[in-house]
Image: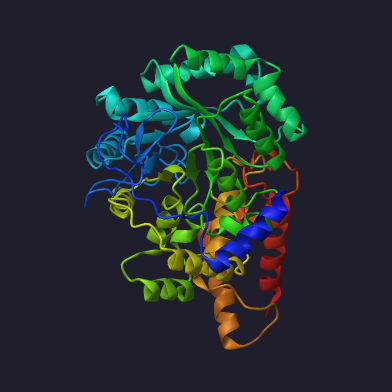
Amino acid sequence: MDRREFIGHSLAAVAGGSLLLSACRNSATGNRQSEGKKTDEPASQGSMTMRVNPNSGDKVSLLGFGMMRLPVEAGGTDRENPDSPIDQQAVNDLVDYALAHGVNYFDTSPVYCRGLSEQSTGTALARHPRSSYFIATKLSNFSRDVWSAKESKAMFERSLQYLRTDYVDYLLLHSIGGTSSGKSSLETFNGRYMDNGILDWLVEQKEKGRIRNLGFSYHGDIAIFDMLLRWHDEGRYHWDFVQIELNYLDWHYADEINPRNTDAAYLYAELEKRGIPAVIMEPLLGGRLAMQPDAIAYKMRRQDPRFTPAAWAFRFAGTPKGVLSVLSGMTYMEHLKENVETYSPLEPLSDDENRWLLALAHDIFELKAIPCTACNYCMPCPYGLNIPAVFSYYNRCIADGTMPAAYGAHDNEYMRQRRAFLAGYDRSVPALRQADHCIGCNHCLSHCPQRIDIPAEMQRIDRFVEALKQTL
């Protein structure tokens, strides 16, 4: 069965009941070993739901802490205040609260937070017993300058140094399937991991105990994802886990939102049938699923007023039984507390709730927002544009229902929305960093894990803004 046939069968399955999203109730006690307990054992009330990694016996918190959006001293994150140092005390407080409430999986990377995430994460975690948490980091050798064996090995060694540990619990090949500097996805993958012998070297490090679990995160060309799973089937390489983007909008609409993406239904099913645990990124799709327009939020409240839009998304991501952990980048304590509450314990989606939420995804898909997750990989723009800020403002107006309805209309409501949109655009994005300054240099294209045609979207937004300005 090829991918398209699979999706057709999967859509039919949703109509008759969810086949892939089976309810899961997992043990919430202990960290390191499964101790022979069933993976569907319910968590006690008020305690974090845990999942057992079948490859290692690790008992991992269903909520994982993504160390990608750490707080800075000036407030917010380094994206809003790129010159401000990380607020280490705030990071320590977040980590302390997370560990105290059962969160034990911390995901970082050499490239997060201007290259400072691993050091900050290591500082916070080193204050606690090493056996009380799992560290996940990545070999983020995106630039061709670090494709050599020497530089890639040095990156891994620095990770151990910054994280203050002599082993990594979960090591990922970072964002396989992407392209670099005009290279194809296969050429890029081979350059990063095969031609330099680094993948075989990582396997050796696993044999030495310096890596406990080896896997990869996926964005981009599905052929690379399928190739690595074929290697797993053939026994060439064993993947202990795989990180994928999964949320209720990407379940069936990922490739329609962006043809370079792949529906989560396919990705998850390919892992599930091989027994490879899935770690989930983008459960909120860069925050988009936490900020719903009034009509969508109203439907969610009517369905069950106990759950916020964010909680619905986290429940969806955590329900599949093959999910090991769901990552969330949590800058603020209130977000951490809400997410902890959602998974302490998880109330998995029923089949009826799953069908309802997937139907609601269609309404959200029709909003036609740009699938930007504000990961900031496209930055800095050589011409000074704030690409994530432009996309964020545009998407927020769609989600809020404040987008001017039609060009050239002269009714009072349109004119009010037009003025509000233009004024808000100027407040949100400085004039010299707006879409009209994009020259289409394509520098950003190879860096976007969502494979957004950024210049085309910037030009589309610029045309829209210019049309609004011309309206009298």
Coloured how?
A: rainbow
Q: Which residue is drawn at 69% across and 77% down?
A: 407
**Residue 157 x/y as whole percent:** 48, 15
Q: Can residue 164 be seen in this view?
A: yes
**Residue 401 x/y as whole percent:** 53, 74
Q: Can residue 458 be seen in this view?
A: no
Q: Residue at x 30, y 37 (%)?
A: 37
Q: Which of 128 and 211 is in front in this view?
A: 211
Judge left or right: residue 171 versus residue 103: right
Q: Which residue lies furthest to the bottom in this view?
A: 411
Where 301 sits versus 349, above or below?
below
Where 10 sits versus 123, above or below?
below
Q: Residue at x 73, y 54 (%)?
A: 456
Please count the marks in the image: 0
Q: Which residue is drawn at 27% across and 42% down?
A: 28
**Residue 431 x/y as whole percent:** 60, 56
Q: Nearer the viewer, residue 113 or 216?
A: 216
User: Which quarter shows the C terminus?
Assistant: bottom right
